[in-house]
Amino acid sequence: MNKRNKFSISIILPFLNEINSLKKTIVILEKIEFQKEYIIIYSDKLTNHKNKLELQKLQKSLKNFRCFSQLKPFVGGAIDLGIKKSKLKFIAIMASDLETNPNELIKMIRISLKNSNSIISADRWLSQKGFSNYGIIKYFANFFFQKLIKLFFKYEILDFTFAYRIYPRKILKNLSITELRHGFALELLLKPITMGCDIITIPATWRKRVEGTSSISIRSYFSYLKVLFKNL
Protein backbone atom coordinates (compact mmCIF):
# COMPACT_ATOMS: atom_id res chain seq x y z
CA MET A 1 0.00 0.00 0.00
CA ASN A 2 1.53 3.37 -1.02
CA LYS A 3 1.49 6.64 0.91
CA ARG A 4 -1.52 7.99 -0.99
CA ASN A 5 -3.65 5.05 0.10
CA LYS A 6 -2.54 5.39 3.71
CA PHE A 7 -3.29 9.11 3.95
CA SER A 8 -6.48 10.16 5.74
CA ILE A 9 -7.46 13.54 7.12
CA SER A 10 -10.00 15.04 9.52
CA ILE A 11 -10.92 18.58 8.47
CA ILE A 12 -12.10 20.79 11.34
CA LEU A 13 -14.41 23.62 10.30
CA PRO A 14 -15.73 25.89 13.10
CA PHE A 15 -19.12 27.24 12.05
CA LEU A 16 -21.48 30.03 13.06
CA ASN A 17 -23.87 30.98 10.23
CA GLU A 18 -21.78 31.16 7.02
CA ILE A 19 -23.69 28.30 5.36
CA ASN A 20 -23.12 29.30 1.71
CA SER A 21 -19.38 29.66 2.25
CA LEU A 22 -19.30 26.29 4.02
CA LYS A 23 -21.07 24.64 1.08
CA LYS A 24 -18.60 26.18 -1.39
CA THR A 25 -15.74 24.98 0.79
CA ILE A 26 -17.12 21.42 0.85
CA VAL A 27 -17.55 21.39 -2.95
CA ILE A 28 -13.85 22.22 -3.36
CA LEU A 29 -12.68 19.82 -0.66
CA GLU A 30 -14.67 16.98 -2.20
CA LYS A 31 -12.09 17.04 -5.02
CA ILE A 32 -9.58 15.63 -2.53
CA GLU A 33 -9.26 11.94 -3.34
CA PHE A 34 -7.96 10.81 0.03
CA GLN A 35 -10.05 9.45 2.86
CA LYS A 36 -11.44 12.42 4.75
CA GLU A 37 -14.05 13.49 7.26
CA TYR A 38 -15.54 16.91 7.94
CA ILE A 39 -15.79 17.88 11.60
CA ILE A 40 -18.23 20.78 11.86
CA ILE A 41 -18.35 22.50 15.24
CA TYR A 42 -21.27 24.89 15.58
CA SER A 43 -22.56 27.04 18.42
CA ASP A 44 -25.90 25.98 19.85
CA LYS A 45 -26.30 29.56 21.08
CA LEU A 46 -25.12 31.54 18.03
CA THR A 47 -25.97 29.28 15.07
CA ASN A 48 -29.54 30.03 14.00
CA HIS A 49 -32.22 27.39 13.57
CA LYS A 50 -32.28 27.63 9.77
CA ASN A 51 -28.57 26.91 9.49
CA LYS A 52 -28.78 24.05 11.99
CA LEU A 53 -31.32 22.48 9.63
CA GLU A 54 -28.95 23.08 6.71
CA LEU A 55 -26.19 21.28 8.60
CA GLN A 56 -28.55 18.35 9.17
CA LYS A 57 -29.21 18.17 5.41
CA LEU A 58 -25.48 18.13 4.68
CA GLN A 59 -24.99 15.42 7.27
CA LYS A 60 -27.60 13.26 5.55
CA SER A 61 -26.11 13.77 2.08
CA LEU A 62 -22.45 13.24 3.08
CA LYS A 63 -21.52 10.16 5.10
CA ASN A 64 -18.24 11.76 6.19
CA PHE A 65 -19.89 14.97 7.45
CA ARG A 66 -20.12 15.05 11.25
CA CYS A 67 -21.59 17.90 13.32
CA PHE A 68 -21.12 18.70 16.99
CA SER A 69 -22.32 21.49 19.25
CA GLN A 70 -19.32 23.07 20.95
CA LEU A 71 -18.99 22.71 24.69
CA LYS A 72 -16.41 25.40 25.47
CA PRO A 73 -16.85 28.99 24.24
CA PHE A 74 -15.08 30.87 21.42
CA VAL A 75 -13.19 29.56 18.42
CA GLY A 76 -10.52 27.85 20.52
CA GLY A 77 -13.25 25.89 22.27
CA ALA A 78 -14.57 24.78 18.88
CA ILE A 79 -11.14 23.66 17.72
CA ASP A 80 -10.51 21.82 20.99
CA LEU A 81 -13.70 19.77 20.53
CA GLY A 82 -12.90 19.21 16.85
CA ILE A 83 -9.53 17.70 17.76
CA LYS A 84 -11.15 15.40 20.30
CA LYS A 85 -13.72 14.21 17.74
CA SER A 86 -11.22 13.66 14.92
CA LYS A 87 -10.54 10.02 14.02
CA LEU A 88 -8.15 10.04 11.06
CA LYS A 89 -4.34 10.16 10.85
CA PHE A 90 -4.01 13.85 10.06
CA ILE A 91 -5.96 16.89 11.21
CA ALA A 92 -6.53 20.06 9.20
CA ILE A 93 -7.72 23.28 10.81
CA MET A 94 -9.33 25.83 8.51
CA ALA A 95 -12.22 28.31 8.28
CA SER A 96 -15.71 27.65 6.98
CA ASP A 97 -16.15 31.25 5.77
CA LEU A 98 -13.60 31.11 2.88
CA GLU A 99 -11.11 33.34 4.72
CA THR A 100 -8.83 30.34 4.21
CA ASN A 101 -8.59 29.19 0.59
CA PRO A 102 -9.74 25.55 0.41
CA ASN A 103 -7.80 25.04 -2.83
CA GLU A 104 -4.60 25.54 -0.84
CA LEU A 105 -5.40 22.56 1.37
CA ILE A 106 -4.80 20.29 -1.61
CA LYS A 107 -1.28 21.72 -1.96
CA MET A 108 -0.69 21.31 1.77
CA ILE A 109 -1.74 17.67 1.60
CA ARG A 110 0.78 16.99 -1.18
CA ILE A 111 3.55 18.30 1.07
CA SER A 112 2.21 16.38 4.06
CA LEU A 113 2.36 13.17 2.02
CA LYS A 114 6.13 13.58 1.70
CA ASN A 115 6.62 14.84 5.28
CA SER A 116 4.29 12.72 7.39
CA ASN A 117 5.81 13.73 10.75
CA SER A 118 5.75 17.48 10.06
CA ILE A 119 3.22 20.22 10.66
CA ILE A 120 2.30 21.98 7.42
CA SER A 121 1.57 25.62 8.20
CA ALA A 122 0.05 28.11 5.75
CA ASP A 123 1.92 31.42 5.76
CA ARG A 124 0.36 34.63 4.44
CA TRP A 125 3.63 36.55 4.62
CA LEU A 126 5.27 34.20 2.13
CA SER A 127 2.71 35.11 -0.53
CA GLN A 128 2.78 38.31 -2.59
CA LYS A 129 -1.00 38.50 -2.23
CA GLY A 130 -1.31 37.04 1.24
CA PHE A 131 -3.84 39.56 2.55
CA SER A 132 -7.00 40.75 0.79
CA ASN A 133 -9.11 43.49 2.43
CA TYR A 134 -7.33 42.87 5.73
CA GLY A 135 -7.30 46.50 6.88
CA ILE A 136 -4.18 48.63 7.13
CA ILE A 137 -4.12 48.81 10.95
CA LYS A 138 -4.56 45.04 11.31
CA TYR A 139 -1.91 44.49 8.63
CA PHE A 140 0.80 46.46 10.42
CA ALA A 141 -0.27 45.16 13.84
CA ASN A 142 0.14 41.63 12.52
CA PHE A 143 3.50 42.48 10.96
CA PHE A 144 4.96 43.90 14.17
CA PHE A 145 3.52 41.13 16.34
CA GLN A 146 5.18 38.52 14.14
CA LYS A 147 8.48 40.39 14.64
CA LEU A 148 7.90 40.39 18.40
CA ILE A 149 7.39 36.62 18.42
CA LYS A 150 10.60 36.07 16.47
CA LEU A 151 12.55 37.92 19.16
CA PHE A 152 11.80 34.98 21.45
CA PHE A 153 11.41 32.08 19.01
CA LYS A 154 14.24 31.92 16.46
CA TYR A 155 12.30 29.84 13.97
CA GLU A 156 11.97 30.15 10.20
CA ILE A 157 8.29 31.04 10.40
CA LEU A 158 6.82 34.38 9.35
CA ASP A 159 3.18 33.77 10.23
CA PHE A 160 2.67 32.40 13.74
CA THR A 161 -0.99 33.44 14.06
CA PHE A 162 -2.60 31.88 10.97
CA ALA A 163 -4.38 28.74 12.15
CA TYR A 164 -4.62 27.16 8.67
CA ARG A 165 -2.51 24.03 9.17
CA ILE A 166 -2.24 20.26 8.81
CA TYR A 167 -1.04 18.32 11.85
CA PRO A 168 -0.19 14.68 12.35
CA ARG A 169 -2.98 13.62 14.68
CA LYS A 170 -0.48 12.18 17.18
CA ILE A 171 0.92 15.69 17.79
CA LEU A 172 -2.40 17.34 18.58
CA LYS A 173 -3.63 14.47 20.71
CA ASN A 174 -0.69 15.13 23.05
CA LEU A 175 -1.55 18.82 23.39
CA SER A 176 -4.20 20.62 25.38
CA ILE A 177 -5.65 23.97 24.32
CA THR A 178 -5.71 26.40 27.22
CA GLU A 179 -6.50 29.58 25.25
CA LEU A 180 -10.07 29.57 23.98
CA ARG A 181 -9.98 32.85 22.08
CA HIS A 182 -8.09 33.44 18.82
CA GLY A 183 -4.74 33.10 20.58
CA PHE A 184 -5.23 29.32 20.32
CA ALA A 185 -3.67 29.60 16.83
CA LEU A 186 -0.41 30.80 18.33
CA GLU A 187 -0.58 28.25 21.14
CA LEU A 188 -0.92 25.38 18.65
CA LEU A 189 2.34 26.43 17.03
CA LEU A 190 4.47 27.47 20.01
CA LYS A 191 3.82 24.27 21.94
CA PRO A 192 4.90 21.98 19.06
CA ILE A 193 8.01 24.16 18.59
CA THR A 194 9.01 23.64 22.22
CA MET A 195 8.38 19.91 21.73
CA GLY A 196 10.87 19.88 18.85
CA CYS A 197 8.30 19.24 16.10
CA ASP A 198 9.24 19.97 12.51
CA ILE A 199 7.20 22.71 10.80
CA ILE A 200 7.04 23.36 7.07
CA THR A 201 5.53 26.62 5.85
CA ILE A 202 3.98 27.25 2.44
CA PRO A 203 2.68 30.48 0.83
CA ALA A 204 -1.02 31.01 1.42
CA THR A 205 -3.69 33.68 1.12
CA TRP A 206 -6.34 35.21 3.34
CA ARG A 207 -9.36 37.15 2.18
CA LYS A 208 -12.06 38.92 4.14
CA ARG A 209 -15.22 36.90 4.61
CA VAL A 210 -18.21 37.83 2.48
CA GLU A 211 -20.73 36.09 4.70
CA GLY A 212 -21.36 36.09 8.43
CA THR A 213 -19.67 38.30 11.01
CA SER A 214 -16.26 38.07 12.60
CA SER A 215 -16.13 36.92 16.22
CA ILE A 216 -12.75 38.52 16.92
CA SER A 217 -12.65 41.22 19.61
CA ILE A 218 -10.11 43.35 21.47
CA ARG A 219 -9.85 40.58 24.07
CA SER A 220 -9.09 38.15 21.26
CA TYR A 221 -6.11 40.25 20.20
CA PHE A 222 -4.81 40.34 23.77
CA SER A 223 -5.11 36.55 23.89
CA TYR A 224 -2.16 36.34 21.48
CA LEU A 225 0.03 38.28 23.92
CA LYS A 226 -1.20 36.13 26.78
CA VAL A 227 -0.19 32.96 24.90
CA LEU A 228 3.18 34.38 23.85
CA PHE A 229 4.33 35.29 27.35
CA LYS A 230 2.85 32.13 28.86
CA ASN A 231 5.02 30.01 26.55
CA LEU A 232 8.33 31.83 27.02
Image (spheres, grey):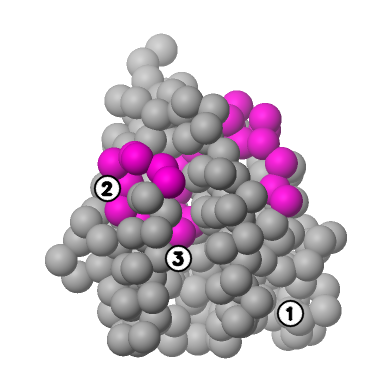
Q: Position of residue 6 (x, y in %)?
A: 46, 22
Image side of residue 196 versus residue 108, left or right = right
Q: Position of residue 218 (x, y in %)?
A: 60, 82
Q: Camera-side residue: 109 or 61?
A: 109
Question: Residue at 48% across / 35% down in the picture?
Answer: 193
Residue 161 sits above or below residue 116 on the image: below
Q: Secondary structure under badge 1? A: loop
Q: Is residue 213 visible?
A: yes
Disc 2/disc 1 C-alpha distance (Å): 33 Å
Q: Residue furthest left?
A: 128
Numbered label attached to residue 210: none
Residue 39 sits above or below residue 205 on the image: above
Disc 3/disc 1 C-alpha distance (Å): 18 Å
Image side of residue 196 versus residue 173, left or right = left
Image side of residue 161 versus residue 39, left or right = left
Question: Residue at 61% across / 82% down in the picture?
Answer: 217
Q: Secondary structure under badge 2? A: strand
Q: Secondary structure under badge 3? A: helix
Numbered label attached to residue 202: 2
Q: Marks 2 and 3: which is nearer the front?
A: 2
The magenta span reads 152-178
Tag 1 residue: 47
Which badge, 2 or 3, comes first in the chain's sequence? Answer: 3
Q: Answer few, some or many: residues within 10 Å of disc 3's Cα (few below 14, many 20 plus, some between 14 and 19).
A: many
Numbered label attached to residue 25: 3
Answer yes or no: do the residues labelled 2 and 3 have beta carbons within 8 Å? Answer: no
Q: Where does the C terminus fall, quadrant-wise?
A: top right
Q: Amino acid at mark 3?
A: Thr
Question: Residue at 51% across / 65% down in the picture?
Answer: 95
Which badge, 2 or 1, comes first in the chain's sequence? Answer: 1
Q: Amino acid at mark 2?
A: Ile
Residue 22 sits above or below residue 68 on the image: below
